[in-house]
Amino acid sequence: MSRIRIDGLSKSYRRTLALDRIDLDIEPASLTVFCGPPGSGKSVLMRVLIGLEAPSSGRILFDGEDITGFPAAARSIGYVPQSFALFPHMSVFDNIAYPMALQRVPRAEIAVRVRQAAEMLRIAPLLEKRPSQLSGGEKQRAAIARGILKNASIFILDDPLVGLDFKLRESLMEDLKDMRAEIDATFLYVTSDSLEAMTMAEQFVLMDRGHIVQAGPVETVYHEPALLRAAELLGFPRCNILAGEFDAASALCTTPLGRFAVAVENGAAPGEAEIAIRPEHIAPAIGATAPLAVGTIRLTENLGSESVVHLGIGNTTLVTTVPAASLARLDLGDSFPFTIRSAGPIVFDRATGRRIGRATPEAEASSASISTPGLPVAGHD
Amino acid sequence: MTEIRIDRLRRTYGALIAVKDISFAFPAGKVTCLLGPSGCGKTTLLRMVAGLERPSAGTVRFGDRDVTRLSASRRDVAMVFQYPVMYRTLSVIENIELPLANDRAIAPAERRRRVEEVIEVLQLGNSRRLHIDHLDLGSRQKVAVGRAIARHCAVTLFDEPTTNVEVHAKLALIRAFKELRQRIRQTIIYVTHDQTEAMTLADQIALMREGEIIQCAPPRELYDEPNSEFGGWFLGNPGMNFLQPRPAQGGGLIVDGVPFPLLFPPEGGSNGNSGILFGIRPEYVRLATAPSPDAVPARVLRRAIAIGGQHLITLAVGESRIKAKVDAETVPAVGSSTFVICPIAHAMLFRGGERLAERPRRLA
């Protein structure tokens, strides 16, 4: 395991800046998920860390040692690339053993370790086969086994589950989490899938356009986004973002859903704003509860235990989730009265993307004498 | 509207049996989704209905017409593929109209009515004159869906049409499909490996595994009452939890040495190697802070934020794992001890992969 320090790291290709002065500390033996849309720079950052590309400026330190100029072979990193990249002419066993053979690990030890990893990843019966005889999921397991069997203190998995079946991804995520618990190393894991990121992450780095948007424990980034972009990029289904107008004097934000009282955190200038409303901040107004607004159901996606409901309100679409059982009688075109949780949504300054504060529907804010606390974030790991 | 009936339909590739003597009726005017993991035979089955693949044995009937030996072009089928197949030099409206124009049985007025109908429902009015090349993949696929539906064929077939479109276009496509369905009733067979898509679109889902249809039911019923361990696992995000409690020496059941406060049917519970699995979906598992007769002691292994801000908790009961979906307010920390309650009303039992009719009983 290694402590990784990334210090002012930039990487440009001609005129495109792929990484823009990245600073980051990664604790030894942690698992950090890097998430962001395509082109956010996460894969470039991994390639620079591995040594497949040189940075344009900045430094990389492993346990305090500057390794920026080291060749890839001298960096002690196990790597699972996006594409399986197995050697077609070798057996699965030889493919997995290859990096250890290069490291001159004794053959008896190689055999034991390959078998252990193969059993953990449930590919032991396939070791004598060729890659062409394997399914996509089996190939990916072999690639993962090869990546993690290297004697390394850092492991980098670059979107290892992309393109695989949903159910296969579910079980491989479980396998990877188990494996990670048994290997004493620092893990970096890249994905562009929000749900996969939240499932895998302990520490979390959200990237966008060559920058780090926010880094920290995944629950903090989810519940306390510092920037609009963080609220936008993390979460499944995606966070609803509505345009609004913030008035600093009254601390009110006017939105298509009416006015919200804002608990301003660090002072803010009046002007154009965005309000971020997570799907779980929207609740159906049942019985005596007066609705804040009424939407029309445009689509319900059935996820099994819950359903994602897409609501139309004028030109706005809002997305919320409801337990599937409660949806039995709702259909396309039906009206859906709802309320919005007090101190759930967050208002951001549109120009800077900075956070202004938590918002509460004005009607509720004026009727309640004490403000409701924000979403509780119980016991961080 | 036509019922599609297949009888002992089989397709082999060398030693591999891709489709194993399936007999099944796709009801007229309904959407049937063929759902299953890759390699389960769903696409092969679809292609045999389309006439793109010749069955090794068995028959395909459209209504009372045996079409087994007819080529695809003579079967009266429309099909939407993973990638939109378009006439690239033609506009949106021309693409939808062309297959209809080639059919002399359709009068020009009827042709125009059908084209306008799908254009309206799909909200393609603004792009009707655009050349296909100017549309993104998602919009092109929408045109492909409209073109197939406008033909009013005996059956319309969809082969994973949303696989290659990005997530927003995919939602638009699913919405368009549902809106079209409300207006135009057709017999539709829709192949997908995506359970959400199947549960969202289907009137009924035929769940496939290893060349067979193992269960066919409306989405809700398939989810709530799986007839197999596979069905419990395959549907759901994540799938059903399975535990294998064994009889304890002093009576009752244990999971890895931890007492399990339920009893199984006598023929299973008394037999040491009964192999009965206990299944419960993560959303029904509850956590408790204090011991009670229903509670099983457990340790929190992992927690993660899941769909719609819920938490997905992985718990260890002995060496076994159980997952629970809980609200954000009640999430215990990783490493902490807790208690798990598995309400029997939502629990089911399986043996040899098959669902048992009996439910577990509470310990007296």
Image (cartoon, helix red, strand yellow):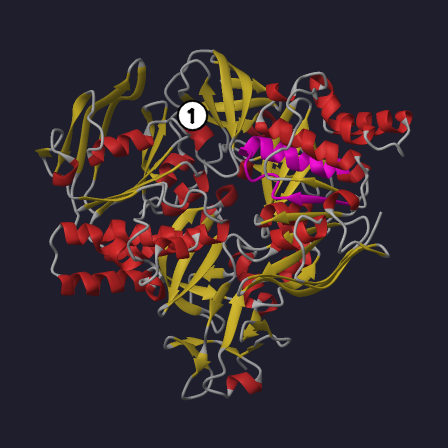
- List x then y, in percent, for residue A235: 47, 37
- List x then y, in percent, for residue B21: 67, 66
Residue A178 visible somewhere in the drawing: yes
Vertical arrangement, residue A308 with respect to residue A171, above or below:
above
Q: Which residue shows up at 30% across the image and 57% down it?
A: A92
Q: Is residue B120 left or right of residue B35?
A: right
- Residue B177 among those drawn in magenta: yes
- List x then y, in percent, for residue A215: 31, 33
Q: Which chain carries label 1?
A: A
Q: Quadrant of residue B6?
A: bottom right
Residue denoted by label 1:
A229
Vertical arrangement, residue A87 with respect to residue A237, above or below:
below
Which residues make up the magenta segment? B155-180
- Residue A206 among those drawn in magenta: no
Q: Which residue shows up at 45% across the image and 21% down it?
A: A348
Q: In which quarter of the image is residue B63?
A: bottom right
Q: Which amino acid does label 1 sit on?
A: Arg
Q: In which quarter of the image is residue A72?
A: top left
Judging depth in this view, the residue of B152 and A63 nearest the camera is B152
- List x then y, in percent, for residue B350: 55, 73
Callout count = 1
Judging depth in this view, the residue of A274 and B103 nearest the camera is B103
User: Secondary structure beneath disc 1?
Assistant: helix
Q: Which residue shows up at 59% across the image and 47% down it?
A: B196
Vertical arrangement, residue B45 with respect to residue A22, above or below:
below
Q: Which residue shows up at 33% across the image and 58% down it?
A: B336
The outermost residue toward the left is A65
